Amino acid sequence: MLKLCLLTAFIGHLMCWYCDCLITYTPDGRFSAKMLNDNEQLSELFKDMSLKRPMRSIMLGVFALIMSFCGFLALSEWMRQFSNVYAVIMLIGAVLFTTCVIPHHVICGLVEWLYIKLGRTDDARKAVLDFFRKTSATMIVCYTGLLIFSVTFFIAVLTGTTALPKWACILNTLPLFLIISPFKVTGSGNIVNAAMFLALAVLI
C-alpha cells in the first residue's frame, strides 16, 4: 500500500508539472515574471493563448495535487514506526501544504484566464496582479508547510532515525530543489517532488 501511495504521488506531481507547462508556455513564447510590469509585452505573449489551457491546468491540477497528498500522508504514517514526533510534524507540514497549494494552483490558473478573458488590457493586468497579491497567503502557507515536511524528513533520515540509509536524505524535496533551481526549469518543484516519491518507492 505504501508503494502504491508513493507511486500515486509520483504520477500526481508529473501531472501537475504538465499543468505548470500549460500556463507557462504559450504559442508565442514562455511566460516570465518580468513581463508583469510591461503589459505590451504580456499582451503580445498571450494574444494566441486559448482559454482552454489555463482552465485545463486548473481542473487537472486539483486532482493531481490530491493524488500527491497520498504520498505525503503515506510517508508521515510510515515515519510513525520510527518517531511519533517526526511523524506528527511531517503530517502537519503535509496538511498545510496540500490545503493551501490547491487554492494557490487554482489562483495561478485563474489570474491567467481572467487576464485573457478581460481582453489583455492594462487594467486587466492590474486587476489580476492585485488579486494575486491579496491571495498570496495561500502561497506562503503552502510552501511553509512543504518546508516543514522536507526539513523534518531530511533530519530524520540523516540522523539514522529511519531504516533508510543516511545518504537517502538527498532524496528529498529541499536538496533536490537546491540542485535543480539554478537551471530555472519550469515546474521544478513538481519535478523534484516526483523524483523524491519515485526514488522512495524503490527504496522503501
Image (spheres, grey):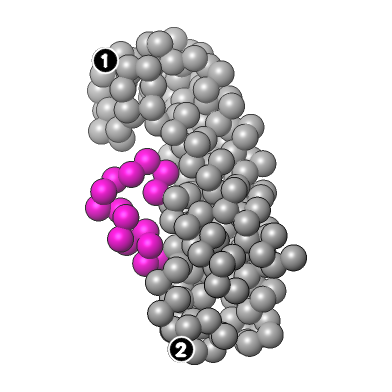
> Residue at 47% of width from left, 57% of height from top?
195
| Residue type highlighted by circle 1 | Glu
Q: What secondary structure characterizes most of the magenta part?
A: helix
Q: Secondary structure at mark 2?
A: loop
> Residue at 74% of width from left, 65% of height from top?
1
Residue 62 x %, y %? 64, 40
17 above or below 191?
Answer: above
Q: Which residues are magenta?
A: 174-188
Residue 187 x %, y %? 42, 44
Q: Is residue 80 something one can see in this rendering? A: yes
> Residue at 52% of width from left, 31% of height from top?
109
Question: Please, which residue is most extreme toward the right here?
Answer: 1
The crowding category of the residue bearing disc 1, from other C-alpha atoms within 10 Å (few below 14, some 14 to 19, many at least 20), is few
- Tags 2 and 1 touching, CB below 8 Å: no
185 is within the stretch colored magenta: yes
Instruction: Please state if 100 lies on the left or on the right of 128 as rendered.
Output: right
User: Quadrant of the rendered structure where residue 97 is?
Assistant: bottom right
Check residue 146 in the rendering and tell me which mark sits there, or answer none.
Answer: none
Give the total number of marks visible in the rendering. Answer: 2
Residue 198 x %, y %? 54, 60
Q: CA distance from mark 2 to mark 1?
A: 53 Å
> Residue at 45% of width from left, 29% of height from top?
23
**Where the C terminus falls, by quadrant?**
bottom right
| Residue type highlighted by circle 2 | Thr
Instruction: Please state if 170 lies on the left or on the right of 10 as rendered.
Output: left
Which residue carries the number 2 mark?
159
Mark closer to the observer (2, 1): 2
Question: Please, which residue is most extreme toward the front here?
Answer: 202
The crowding category of the residue bearing disc 2, from other C-alpha atoms within 10 Å (few below 14, some 14 to 19, many at least 20), is few
Which residue carries the number 1 mark?
40
158 is within the stretch colored magenta: no
Query: Sequence order check: which comes first, mark 2 or mark 1?
Result: 1
